[in-house]
Image: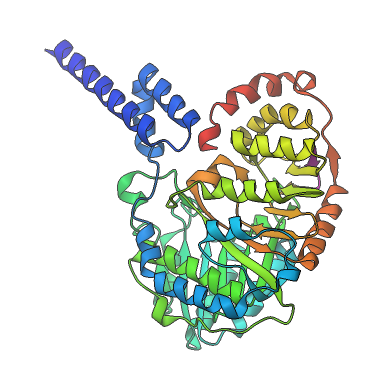
């Protein structure tokens, strides 16, 4: 009897593995991902079937409902585009691919201020929170209940007490260690909290693989912040493990703030099934810097591969210079080819990565790609002054971007991300000067894979097998 039961369970497991394999073949976002799942499911169903339940879903099919709810705002922004349309003489590259990806137009009348490292970032954010008059929209991937997290909580509670409507959101995976009391304290103070444990989607569909990686602060629809920092003392450089934490945030003003606000509305709608459109200010003002800008949000709810295509579009536009800073380098084959082709046509292509390890698997997998791009002329720089976590790039003297997107498959296809793009030589100069200073704290990678230590030579090809989910 026991033998028959075990045989039946094994048979059911293999049938399930075959069904999942068929689903993976039909719906995986890349051929590599499809092949990987099919081989894994058929060869090791006992391990693969449970993993597929958690990691194998492919899109948030319902996420675009949020965009449907906000279409009237999108149409309003597009109608306003004639008024805020950039002067063609100020655009030295074609913005159309980026506008298609964003479903929004590039606008003039924007301002930007680089915030280098944690102290500058949170000083600016806390100052803006203290000055808020009507509402605060705030969202971080990671929030910790440490000194910095408690300071943020106090600032938000103080704002709520003086009549500011505060809406707070974080990610269930990124903030899995955040105690319930942290959120309850804010609720009791009148803050509107989107509890990650109660939001729709991942909690009942096992979609722990999908994460909202955006870091957004919006004050009264006038000032916005985006970048690489989360809320934790390590981002202030106070971690014994990492020491100095090199990261970049961006303070924005102008029309791009309303675009960032629109993305927050979509995230809030997904988390709370609540439409904020009529509760927020969509008029706003223009910035004196008068820069051309666009907010490009990407994620698994999109119909196309918007994350990878954003980088592809930037690489394709580069004529003289393409510098990219990212904590991880696990690109897909299209981005690899684009980087190689850019270097082959004479573009100064540089990839800035940390030498310090925070997540060993993606750090190791990156070595499997270095020889291929270096052979075509791409230069790889390893940052040594602590851990580098910024997500930024600069194209020629024409385009600069700062945001949340890493140069890896997870950011391209699995996470909800956002990048602020500024089509202005002043922004390009500011980011290039920042990255030039970072290069001073780097060494250029010159050793090929056969010259690396044994743990890299043998570990990197194995780690690369996990590229679709890294």
The stretch drawn in magenta includes residue 317:
no
Q: Is residue 255 left or right of residue 10?
A: right
Instruction: Name the residue at 40% across, 58% down.
Output: 196
Q: Is residue 25 above or below residue 147?
A: above
Residue in front for this viewpoint, 213 or 4: 213
**Res 144 visible:** no
The quadrant of the picture occupied by the C terminus is top right
Instruction: Name the residue at 22% across, 22% down.
Output: 12
Instruction: Name the residue at 38% across, 26% down.
Output: 48
Instruction: Name the residue at 60% across, 76% down.
Output: 255
Q: Which residues are magenta?
A: 378-385
Residue in front for this viewpoint, 147 or 387: 387
**Res 198 visible:** yes
Q: Is residue 379 left or right of residue 270?
A: right
The stretch drawn in magenta includes residue 379:
yes
Q: Is residue 303 left or right of residue 98?
A: left
Q: Position of residue 115 (x, y in %)?
A: 73, 66
Q: How many marks?
A: 0
Q: Position of residue 233 (x, y in %)?
A: 65, 59
Q: Position of residue 408 (x, y in %)?
A: 60, 41
Q: Position of residue 432 (x, y in %)?
A: 81, 57
Give the prevailing secondary structure in the magenta stretch.
strand
The picture quadrant where one finds residue 338 is top right
């Amino acid at each position: 009897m026991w033998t028959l039961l075990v045989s039946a369970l094994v048979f059911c497991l293999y049938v399930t593995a075959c069904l999942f394999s068929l689903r993976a073949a039909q719906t995986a976002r890349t051929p590599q991902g499809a092949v990987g799942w099919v081989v894994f499911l058929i060869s090791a169903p006992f391990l693969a079937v449970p993993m597929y339940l958690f990691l194998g879903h492919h899109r948030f099919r319902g996420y675009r409902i949020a965009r449907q709810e906000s279409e009237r705002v999108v149409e309003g922004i597009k109608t306003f585009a004639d008024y805020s349309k950039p002067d063609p003489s100020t655009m030295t590259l074609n913005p159309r691919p980026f506008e298609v990806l964003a479903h929004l137009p590039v606008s003039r009348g924007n301002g930007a201020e680089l915030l280098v490292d944690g102290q500058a970032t949170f000083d600016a954010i806390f100052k803006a929170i203290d000055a808020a008059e009507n509402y605060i929209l705030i969202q971080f991937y990671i929030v910790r209940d440490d000194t910095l997290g408690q300071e943020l909580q106090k600032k938000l509670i103080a704002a709520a007490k003086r009549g500011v409507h505060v809406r707070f959101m974080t990610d269930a995976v990124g903030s899995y260690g955040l105690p319930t009391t942290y959120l309850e304290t804010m609720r009791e103070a009148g803050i509107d909290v989107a509890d990650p444990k109660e939001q729709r989607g991942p909690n009942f569909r096992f979609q722990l693989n999908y994460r909202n990686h955006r870091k957004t602060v919006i004050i009264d629809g006038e000032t916005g912040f985006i970048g690489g920092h989360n809320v934790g003392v390590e981002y202030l450089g106070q971690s014994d493990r990492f020491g100095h934490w090199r990261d970049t945030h961006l303070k924005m003003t102008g029309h791009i703030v309303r675009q960032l606000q629109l993305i927050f509305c979509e995230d809030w709608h997904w988390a709370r099934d609540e439409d904020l459109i009529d509760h927020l200010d969509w008029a706003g003002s223009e910035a004196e810097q008068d820069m051309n800008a666009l907010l490009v949000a990407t994620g698994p709810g999109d119909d196309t591969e918007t994350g990878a295509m954003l980088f592809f579009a930037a690489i394709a536009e580069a004529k003289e210079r393409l510098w990219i800073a990212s904590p991880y380098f696990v690109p897909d084959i299209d981005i690899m080819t684009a980087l190689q082709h850019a270097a082959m046509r004479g573009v100064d292509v540089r990839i800035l990565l940390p030498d310090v390890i925070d997540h060993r698997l993606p750090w190791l997998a990156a070595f499997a790609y270095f020889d291929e791009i270096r052979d075509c002329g791409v230069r790889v720089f390893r940052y040594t002054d602590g851990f580098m976590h910024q997500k930024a790039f600069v194209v020629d003297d024409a385009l600069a971007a700062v945001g949340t997107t890493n140069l890896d498959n997870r950011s391209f296809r699995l996470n909800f991300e956002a990048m602020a793009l500024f089509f202005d030589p002043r922004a390009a100069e500011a980011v290039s000067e920042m990255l030039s200073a970072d290069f001073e704290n780097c060494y250029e990678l010159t050793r090929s894979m056969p010259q690396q230590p044994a743990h890299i030579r043998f570990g990197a090809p194995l780690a690369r097998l996990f590229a679709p989910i890294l």
